[in-house]
Image: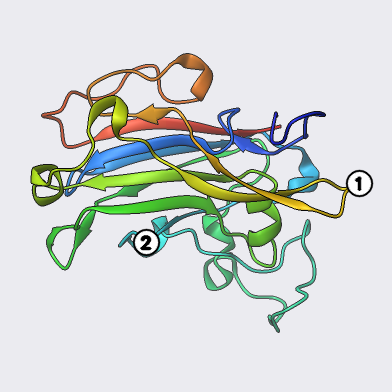
Amino acid sequence: MQALPGAKTRMWTYGGTFPGPTVRRPAGHRTKVTFHHQLPAEAGELTVHLHGGHNRTQFDGQPGGLTARQPISEYCHIPRGLSPRASGNDLLISPGERKTYVYDLVEEGRPERAAFQWYHDHRLDRTARHSWRGLAGMWIVDDELDSSLPLPKGDRDLTRSPTSSRRRTGSSATRSSSTAPTCHTTRSCPAATGCASSMSPPSALTTSTSQTARR
C-alpha cells in the first residue's frame, strides 16, 4: 500500500484498501457484514468491533481468550481450560473462516443517532498492532436530523481519518488524513473495494456487504 510517499508498505487490510471501505447506513436499518479471514496464519484469530455502535454481544467484537495460536496473554490473567463460550473464542474468526455480523443500528429501542464510527480488529492483546497494520475502516450512521442540517453533501461530504505513520528507517512521523471507498445503500461498490457485488435497495431493512481481510 502507498501509506507514505516513496516505498510502499505491506499491510493487512479490509478489502485491499486502507482504511477499509467506508460503510454508510441510515440509522435503524439492520445491516449485515461478512468478514472473510484471508490473512496468513501468523495473524491468528480475528474479531471485528464496530467502535461507537450499540451492538448485540455476539456481534460486538469480543476479544476472545487463549488459543493454540495465542497461548499466553501479555496483559491479562486468563485461566486455562475455559470453554470456547466462556472465553469468547466461539466468536473469533480463524484463518480461512468467515463470520457475518449483524448491526441493528438501534439504541434503547430507537434508531441510533447520527454518528461517525469506525470498525477495527479487537483481538486480545493485538488490537493496537492489528489496527496500525491496517485492519480499520470508517462507518457512518445518518439520521433525519443530521440530513436536515446545512452540512456539505455529495462530492463535498468527505470522510477523513487522521492517521499517524512512521517509517522504520526514519525518526520522524507524519500525520495524514485517509479516505476510503464508500458503500452506500443505493449502489454497488467497485469490485476492488471488497464490498458485496450488490447492495440492498434503500427500502430494504438489511444490507449485506462483504469484507475480506487480506495482505
How far apart marks 2 and 1 lie (CA) works out to: 35 Å
Seen in the picture, residue 206 relative to 78 is either above or below; the reply is above
Please tell me whether mark 2 or mark 1 is closer to you in this view.
Answer: 1
Seen in the picture, residue 89 relative to 136 is either above or below; the reply is below
Q: Secondary structure at mark 1?
A: loop
Would residue 209 be found to the left or right of residue 205 on screen? right
Residue 63, percent across and down? 57, 64
**Tags 2 and 1 in contact by the CB under 8 Å rule?**
no
Q: What residue type is disc 2 on? A: Gly
Observer-nearest of 81 and 115: 115
Observer-nearest of 207 and 171: 171
| Label of residue 52 in the image | 2
Q: Is residue 45 visible?
A: no
Quadrant of the rendered structure where residue 6 is? top right
Residue 49, percent across and down? 47, 56
Quarter of the figure with the C terminus: top right
| Label of residue 202 in the image | none
Look at mark 1 in the image and give the residue it sits on: 169
Observer-nearest of 159 and 20: 159
Quarter of the figure with the N terminus: top right
Q: What residue type is disc 1 on? A: Thr
Q: Secondary structure at mark 2?
A: loop
Would residue 105 be found to the left or right of residue 15 on screen? left
Q: Earlier in the sequence, mark 2 or mark 1?
A: 2
| Residue farthest toward the right in the current orientation of the protein | 169
Residue 154, percent across and down? 25, 27
Residue at 33%, 18% (x, y): give it. 188
Q: Is residue 47 visible?
A: yes
